[in-house]
Amino acid sequence: MKPIRMILALCALVPALAGAETLSTDLAAPAVDTARPTRGASMSAVEARFGAPARRHDAVGKPPITRWDYPGFSVFFEYSHVIHAVAAHPLPPSG
């Protein structure tokens, strides 16, 4: 086979090989996207906007990381500022 024909044949196959499929790995997607605190917000700003947390966990480690639990999400603080807020997902039934 001539090199030109081989290159053209390969070019014709590339789009077919480049196709992709998107798979969802969510076990249980939340029904409503809950508003959560943004990175850098202070503890006092979080409490002013969302109220008192349902549970406050003691600080752990160095730098100290504190967790506040709200219905539907948890907020993680480094010192007194938000570093991350995550939505709570129910655990799948054991079975």
Image (spheres, helix red, strand yellow):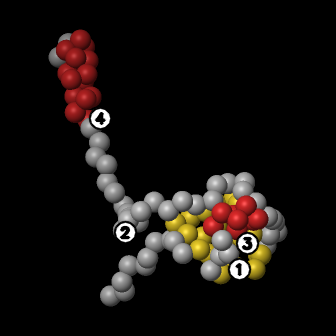
Residue occupied by mark 3: 66
Image quarter of the N terminus? top left
Pointer 1 and pointer 4: residues touching (CB < 8 Å)?
Answer: no
Give me the disc on residue 28. Answer: 2
Residue occupied by mark 4: 18
- Please report whichever mark, 3 or 1, sits nearer to the chain's N-terminal start: 1
Residue 62 drawn above or below residue 21: below
Pointer 2 and pointer 3: residues touching (CB < 8 Å)?
Answer: no
Viewer-proximal residue, 73 or 1? 73
- Please report whichever mark, 2 or 3, sits nearer to the chain's N-terminal start: 2
Q: How crowded is mark 3: few (under 14 residues within 10 Å), some or many (20 or more)?
A: many
- Please report whichever mark, 4 or 2, sits nearer to the chain's N-terminal start: 4
**Residue visible at 81% across and 65% down?**
79
**Residue visible at 31% across and 49% down?**
22
Pointer 3 and pointer 1: residues touching (CB < 8 Å)?
Answer: yes
Please identify the quarter of the rendering in which residue 9 is found: top left
**Residue visible at 21% across and 23% down?**
12
Front of the two marks 1 and 4: 1
The CA distance from mark 1 to mark 2 is 26 Å
Residue occupied by mark 1: 57
Mark 3: which secondary structure? strand
